[in-house]
Amino acid sequence: MSVTTSTSAPWRTRAAVGAAYAAQGYGYATVVTALPGFKVRTGIDDMTISLVLLLGCLLAAAGSVTAERIATRRSSGTALVAGLLAQAVGLALVTTATSVPPLFGAFAVFAVGLGLVDASINMQGVLLQRFAGRSIMSTLFACLTAAAIVASLAQAALANLGATTGAVVSLLVAAVVAAAIALSIRGSLIPRAAAEAAGTAARTVGGATARAARTPLPRAGIWLFGAMVAAAFVADSAVSSWSAVYLADGLDAPATVAPLGYAAYQGAVLVSRLAGDPLVRRFGRGRVVGATVLLAVAGLGLVALVPSPSTAIVGFALTGIGVGALVPQAFSAAGELAPDRLDEVIARINLFNYVGALLGAVVLGLLSEGPGLGPAFLIPALLLLPAVAVSPRFGGAPATGTAGAAGAAAGAVAPPTTPVSAATETPPTTPDAD
């Protein structure tokens, strides 16, 4: 059987999906770093900010569910473009808010768009990886992380205009970025026809369809990999929300040192994601996840048990290595559970990210009143330990046995290339469907 090579997804499609990841990272980082400026403008307190963030998580979850429905009826590309445009509208509306009600309304629009994009970029990312026939998910997530760092630096630079003015300008820039990327990539994303054909091709062995019936929804696998995503986001939210507070209040670190824990964490996440795909291609997903998550557990243990600013900063960096690897590989492995129901699987696993984010922020905050923030970092460490135990379930390198067939099915994505013989590798072991 002749099929196209693994390069069947052209550079414009890869660039479009990577740009969507970057837009997501840039927009979210802009919002969270602009909050201090909007505290001044609207007169809201920390409790109100907490309510805004809680509302955001709930509405983002609703957006993720909506993305599943749009993807199954239209395409994940449609959901992605709609989500970015919603974010652009929400960001622009936030800049006009001078009191709490309009701020809540504007943030609600942004949060729904955030959830739409959260789910749909991973649908597109897993599909793109299937067409490429090699690990690329870490690189896509690296685009998100790098853009978030750029947004944070931009916010810091614009703060020279004043807290409020800087926040408004940065949000307007983020709105323009989201809208521009949405409009520029809409014709280059993977269409529904190619996605459906890829799902069919992924169930074909040696040219014969293994089973004509639609694959049952793999609930056991969704819970397994969803739990891994939740654990990763507990750690991510814990470090993002509490690392600077712990260094400043718990360890008496000077103001110039307190932000370095989060900076070290984000830098390590970026390095982990840039190195992730080559490591996965060489050693397989399971080994990479097992080794890097073990480093994260050790790092959180250092933070919890050794009360030293320098040790804590090192611990937060080690945590970033594990979290940076775990999230893209969990989505990557989940994408192979039921190839013909990829959109549904990815959207449901994406919901666990909001559960983890809430737990990480809230639980550590509650424990800080009891045993203190330091020991509280043992909670995400304990939640990450099962990822080490189940790392073999992540499998080896991404399945390439259907990459060529998927690429051939993606005629709308790319022109045909030089024919080669279809590969017949066995895909990685993944949890069975219920």
Image (cartoon, rainbow, N blue to C red):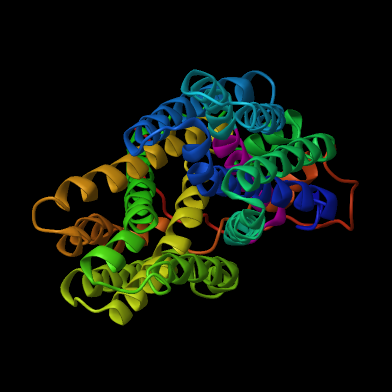
Residue at point 56%, 34% (across, down): 114
Position above or below: 298 against 224: below
- Where residue 1 appears, as percent x and y from the top left, is 77, 49
Range drawn in magenta: 117-134
The secondary structure making up most of the magenta span is helix
Figure quadrant of residue 121? top right
Q: Position of residue 172 (x, y in %)?
A: 71, 39
Instruction: Give the residue drawn at x 70%, y 52%.
Output: 18
- Residue 359 percent coordinates (x, y): 28, 43
Instruction: Decide whether residue 63 is among the magenta residues.
Output: no
* Residue depicted at 35% across the width and 59% down the height: 239
Asked whether residue 344 appears in the rendered view, the answer is yes
User: Compared to 45, does 108 lie above or below?
Assistant: above
The relative height of residue 154 versus residue 180 in the rendered view (above or below) is: below
Residue at 35 percent across and 78 percent down: it is: 314
Which image quarter: residue 275? bottom right
- Quadrant occupied by the C terminus: top left
Q: Is residue 210 visible?
A: no
In the rendered image, residue 132 lying in the magenta stretch gets the answer: yes
- Near-viewer residue (71 or 168): 168
Front residue of this view, candidates 184 and 337: 184
Say which of 427 and 289 sits in front. Answer: 289
Would residue 314 appear left or right of 175 to someone viewing this image? left
